Amino acid sequence: MSAPLAERMRPRDLDEIVGQRRLLAPNAALRRALDAGRVHSMILWGPPGCGKTTLARLVAARSNARFVALSAVMSGLPEVRKVLAEAATQFAAGERTVLFVDEVHRFNKTQQDAFLPHIEAGHVVFVGATTENPSFELNSALLSRCRVHVLDALQADDIEVALRHALDDTERGLGALGLRVDPDALATIAAAADGDVRRALTLLEIAAELADGGLIDQASLAQVLADRTRRFDKQGEQFYDQISALHKSVRSSDPDAALYWLARMIDGGCDPAYLCRRLTRMAVEDIGLADPRALDMAISSWEAFERMGAPEGELALAQLTLYLASCAKSNAGYVAWKAVRAEVQSSGTLGVPMHLRNAPTRLMKDLGYGKHYQYDPDVDGGVALDQVCLPDELVGRQFYAPVARGMEIKLKEKLDALREARRQARAKE
């Protein structure tokens, strides 16, 4: 049985790799180093199907070193130690080893540490591949011994080039089958691959098997592409990048972008309850009292989704997202809460002013609890301007500074007037 098309069409030289021009163009630093046979330990960070494994193999070929591959999903510490011991033996015999570790982020700290002395001694040129941010998933000791090279998701045009190579290649590809291909079909496959050339070649191979009369056209692709999905890792960096994009689009009052990122996350399978919670947080953190209706709408939309479920309830989340992105913004409440929390932690247990203390017993009244308290509804204007409510040590502190946007405009006008009146009342004492 022959290998899958994606494996058969794996590039055999750097010039056959599509995309990655930033790393592999003739004048790029990595390309110059590989062309000169100067190889170094590295971490290849990029999405699936962008060429990490292929590049690792070519690094070995350019350095005239033996290539050994490990998968962090399938291998444990015993396998790692065995491979490293063999590499040390080969090094002593004058042969270097390029050790490729796929999904290296899945190794724990102890397993990652096992590579360090062998990298330092030069027994192996370590090449780790990861789809996750190395800053979070790899320990600093390993990172300090490797260069991180970032590979990009492939553009549709680059993927089309790879597809044409596979169709024309009579030795490894599909060239001997005499397939006829609708020009638009390749563009459809390239777009559906979502930056993953391996996925694109797999889709092409399936389409070739299902092609009616040897013709790959839009009709024959309908079945092949029926269940395709976009890249989305519910626990990885893409997840956090996308929720960050959604939150920041709302904050930037860009409803079109916010709606797009919401759709991306729902399309990728994000838990709707998580989205409801995050959208509600945006209502209180980024909009706050500039439009208090936002919080009411967030809770209502959350309830609507719980009652209707998907897909009907998704419209409630979409409308909420549009409203949050479109209405006035204020983080004054959020800033005030952080400031007062910091004050509470730094100033300790300050006493409640005596006049504000409750006095349910005769003894407490005799001790002055509640003495001179002014009941505001009985005061002209409804506010006892000379009454202090903060601890003595914090009198005059202002934590909440409303912004001149949305409904907070009125709050700002009222509070500014009250604060000035209180200042004047205290000045007369």
Image: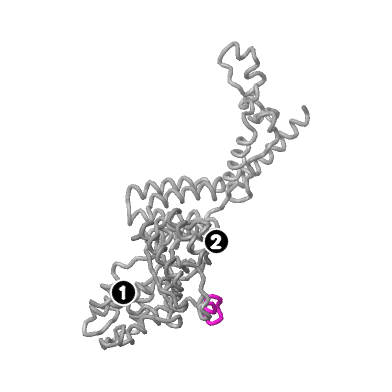
* 2 or 1: tag closer to the N-terminus: 2
Dot label at residue 144? 2
Residue at the limit of the structure toward the front, as seen here: 93
Between disc 2 and disc 1, the foreground one is: 2
Dot label at residue 202? 1
Q: Which residue is drawn at 65% across and 25% down?
A: 353
The kind of residue tagged 1 is Thr
The kind of residue tagged 2 is Ser
Element on which disc 1 rests: helix
Residue 131 versus residue 59 in the image, above or below: above
Residue 360: quarter of image: top right
Residue 387: quarter of image: top right
Q: Horizontal placement of 229 versus 414: left or right? A: left
- Camera-side residue: 105 or 318? 105
Residue 139 point in image, percent of width and height: 50, 56
Residue 369 point in image, percent of width and height: 63, 18
Density class for disc 1 (Cα within 10 Å; few <14, some 14-19, many ≥20) is some
* Residue 259 visible in the shown view: no
- Camera-side residue: 351 or 287? 351
Quick check: is 350 in the magenta stretch? no
Residue 206 point in image, percent of width and height: 26, 75
Q: Residue at x 72, y 35 (%)?
A: 421
| Quadrant where the image shows the C terminus | top right
- Camera-side residue: 242 or 19? 19
Find the magenta span and give its range.
Answer: 25-33
